[in-house]
Every structure is written in structure tokens, then in C-alpha cells.
Image (cartoon, grey):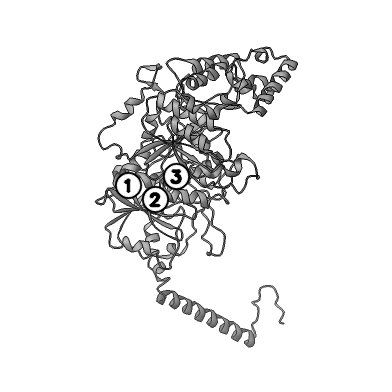
Amino acid sequence: MGVTTAGEAPLKSPVRASVIVKLNAAFLAFFLFAYMALLLHPKYSYLLDRGATSLVRCTFRDTCPPPSSQLPRKLGAMPANKVAAAAAERIVNAGRAPTMFDELRGRLRLGLVNMGRDDLLALGVEGEAVRVDFDRVSDVFRWSDLFPEWIDEEEDDEGPSCPELPMPDFSLYGDVDAVVASLPCNRTAPAGWNRDVFRLQVHLVAAHMAARKGRRDGGGAVGVVLRSECEPMMDLFPCDEAVGREGEWSMYRMDVRRLEEKLRLPVGSCNLAMPLWGSGGIHEVFNVSELSSSPPGAVRPRGREAYATVLHSSDTYLCGAIVLAQSIRRSGSTRDLVLLHDHTVSKPALRALTAAGWTPRKIKRIRNPHAAKGTYNEYNYSKFRLWQLTEYSRVVFVDADILVLRNLDALFRFPQLAAVGNDGSLFNSGVMVIEPSACTFDALVRGRRTIRSYNGGDQGFLNEVFVWWHRLPRRVNYLKNFWANTTGERALKERLFGADPPEVWSVHYLGMKPWTCYRDYDCNWNVADQRVYASDAAHRRWWQVYDQMGEAMRGPCRLSERRKVEIAWNRHVAQEVGYADQHWKINITDPRKWE
């Protein structure tokens, strides 16, 4: 090696120079070959037609799409709220387009949501592309902002309200022949991928675009194509309107009137879907007949409708179901009453249920694979059978431990899934509006092994499937409990339970049920951890309906000898504790004590 002094240029040997020339020639040949391959190969040539920026597919903060063998990509943070179709969830798929896109070829206008024209060209889909721009919801926006645990539905202060979810200015866009949307699937979302606010926003933008700007076919339907690594929300895009699925793509023929019906509702459970108060203010309970005054064409024609309940695994709720049917009929409803039951319901019990008004329908139980054997939850997924009642357009499910006090027929005006709130962002499934569908039933059954219920029961499972639910006033399914355990709470609820005419639509009897007690008092008073459910007014209300039933219906309401012993023991313990309310010393006059 030569030695170089300061200020001198290094010397190159002839051998070194020739090696460098050969290496440069090799690199030049490689790049020329790669360029020609890109230019001539149809799979990649489309990239070269759009300039150098098109080759850089990850210039934004979203992650690059991995090969199909890798995990699904995650939705990254955006540098600004403006959603550019090429910046949000990219679709980079230069292979053959799904066959469902054959139906879109030749269309004049396609509305693109959360994607850009390049994405369609990459799939070989041509036509006039209309990109729908909107401000992406802020990252500080939480699911609980749209689905809070509590709202001021009684309007004690200013009443409930919903935060604004940014939507496009739809007046800027003309009609389109179909809407094509890319739905984000953020597996790391704080509330879970199915409770991601941005995901909901894209669903709603696509739904509004289809309802407002989609050209309808002869049957009043609009074409919508969705791409998602996760299942699209059945709340907005029901599976019975899907006409094709291929990989991550789903095509729908959306019934526009059905879609508009949903989009008129609040964006979340942050506001009531059904008003509580009438036009006269908070002292006038809302007259549900006002819901029938909608303008012609505002809602789609309705088919048959029914109330339904489910009995399985034991005879514990037989008496409750009988009184429930009688209370529905006493409210003035003439809708069908359908009882789903398993093999454990005896023939004498079926005769009593039929006399009460139910049309019995035998079902095969559905096992909850996550429940312990021998528990009630073991077969509580039998409730999925409600979605097999496809001869009805809507069904209002009512638990058998509920007493109806006012006509609930107005609930049939609301789409799936409407219910009252429970804990957190969840609904209570004791009273809920559903829309029977064979494919929805299949989806529920398929998901029973992979979807985990927060409480081990059907309520927790359904809350994972129907996340975009619609809040009904809690007076529709008024829970019999006194969680706050204050004098003010008890005074208010006891008044509501006993009000005549009724001020709540139904009472949901938590704790020990009225038919498992003597009629003389609510036996929840005598058990320490059940006293929170005790109410003399609600107890009397249930027995008023029982007293008007014929003898043919009362058989399943008898007390077993074991239950009589349990009641006597609880009275003894309550006396020993010395509860000041002294329900333990009330004289028993209920004739069932001696039957």
C-alpha cells in the first residue's frame, strides 16, 4: 500500500481501478434489467405511470402493507385530521381483482370512502372515481364519548346530547352508481377493534353516501362494496343484504329505506332513540302514538311483528313467562306472542303457557362453550334462536322476569339493536328489538367459540356483536334495584313502581323473583345480599296481574317444598340479624304455603 503525505492525492493501482470499473458496470446492468422488468411486467407497470411519488407507498404515518403471510397491518396515527384517500388505510393489491368487481366495470361514477382512485386502478376497476373527503375524527375521541354509561335522559339538568362526529359535506357530490369503502381494522384500539371510533366514522360516511347519493335500482337498493380485514358492522351493513364475499371484500345491495331508518337515529347511545318526555315538557310522559305520525315513505313497510321470550334448562321461569304474557295482553297489544322452549318444559306447563297467550315453539338448545357444565349459562346461547323467527320482520324480546305495565308496541318502530343501557358502553338485553335473519343466526353460532362474553352469558356476547346499538329510555326496562341505597332513590323508585297510571313501561325483577316468594312480602328483604333488590310496591304490582289470571294458568306458580323451607330459613336468619324493616315477622296468608 502506498503512503500519502499531507496535500497529496492517494495513488490508485491499475488493478484497483479495473475492479472498480467492473463493479460499476455490473450495478448499471442490474438497474437497467430491473427497470425493464418493471416496464414490461403488467403487474407493476401501472406504478411507473404516476411519477416517482407513486412508488413511495408509505410517505404517511400509516404502516406499509405487509405480505399476506404477515400479521394484519395496524392503523397508525395521522399527522392531520384531513383524510386523504391515499393517506388512510391503503389498498395495495396489484393482483387480480375480486370477481365481484366485474359488476362495477363500466359504471360511470363510483364514490370512494377512505381510499383513492389509484386503489381502484390497482384492482383493474375503471370509471369515474369520486373521492369523498372528510375530517378524520380526533385521536382523543373515545368510544365512551359516543356510548357513555349514563346520560341525563330524565333531563334533570340540560338533557342528553351527542358529540359531533365529522361528516363530509354531501352537497358537494353528485350521484354515484356505487360506494366503495376501505374500513380500518385497528387491532390495537383501546376499546377493541370493533369499538374503534374511526372505524365507526368510515362506516357512517359510507352509509350516508349510499343513502344520500347512491343511485337506486328498481328495488330501491344501492350498491356498496367494503374492504376490511375485520367483519363489517352488522348494525349498519347486515349480512342479509350482502350479495357477495371474496377475501377481504364484501358487496351489498343496501335497502335504502332501511338504511335511512338507521341513519336518522343518534350517532350513539349518547342520546335517546325514543324520547322520554312529550312536547309538554318533563311532566308529560311521551305518547308513543306520536311515532306513527312519520311522513309517508319515511320508514320502510313493516312485516309481521312479535314479542318473544325463551325458556330452557329448567322450570324456574315458567310462572314469570305466564304473567309476562298476561301483562302484554293487558297493555292492549295484539302482536303475536312467541315462546321458544326446550325439552324441559312439560306438557302441563305448555298448556298453561298457551292459555296465557303464548304460541310455543320447541327449539334445540345451543351450548355456550365457555360456560361450566350444569350452570344456567351453559345453554343461554339458546337465545340466538330468536334470529330464526324469520317470518317476522321485527321481534321485541322480553325476559320472563319482566312485567309490562304500558304498551310497548312503539318499540317495533326501531331497528336492530335497540335496548336500554347497562354498565359502561353496554346494553341490557332484558328488552331488545331485533331483526330475525338466517345469516345473522349463522354468524352468532359461528362466533360462539371465538367471541368472549364479559359476563359469561348471552348479554355479554351480543354486546360484542352489536356495538352500534340504540338507547331506549331506562323506563322501558326499569330495573328493580336500589344500588345507591339512599332514601331519595328508594322514594323515587317506589313511587314509579306503584304509579297509576304507570310511569314506567316495564319492571325488570332482579334478585329473587315474585313467584318464588309469598305474595305477602318481597322475600329479598330477608337475605343480606338481596336486600338491594327488595321493593314492596313492585312486588304488589306483579301479584295484581297474577290475581287476574285464570286457575288454568296458575299451576306452574306453585312453590316446591324445598323452596318453602328456604323461605322459612331466611325468615329465621333475618329475625336473628334483627332487620329493622321486620319483614321477617309478617304473617303469611298466601294459600300456596299449604298447597
User: Which residue is under mark 3?
Assistant: 387
Which is nearer the N-term, disc 1 or disc 3? Answer: 1
In the image, which is nearer the foreground, mark 2 or mark 3? 3
Find the distance from the CA under tag 1 to the CA under tag 3.
Answer: 19 Å
Q: Is residue 33 visible?
A: yes
Q: Quadrant of the N terminus?
A: bottom right
Q: Give the residue type that dot 2 points to.
A: Asp
Say the numbered circle drawn on residue 240. 2
Q: Is residue 271 visible?
A: no
Above-or-below relation of 309 to 475: below
User: Which residue is under mark 1?
Assistant: 255
Q: Give the residue type that dot 3 points to.
A: Trp
Left or right of 360 in this view: 487: right
**Which secondary structure, mark 2?**
helix
Q: Classify mark 1: residues with Cα within 10 Å, few (<14), some (14-19) or many (20+).
A: many
Picture coordinates of residue 175, whole percent (x, y) = 27, 49
**Which secondary structure, mark 1?**
strand
Q: Give the residue type that dot 1 points to.
A: Asp
Picture coordinates of residue 234, whole percent (x, y) = 44, 47
Picture coordinates of residue 305, whole percent (x, y) = 37, 37
Find the distance from the CA under tag 1 to the CA under tag 2.
Answer: 10 Å
Which is nearer the N-term, disc 2 or disc 3? Answer: 2
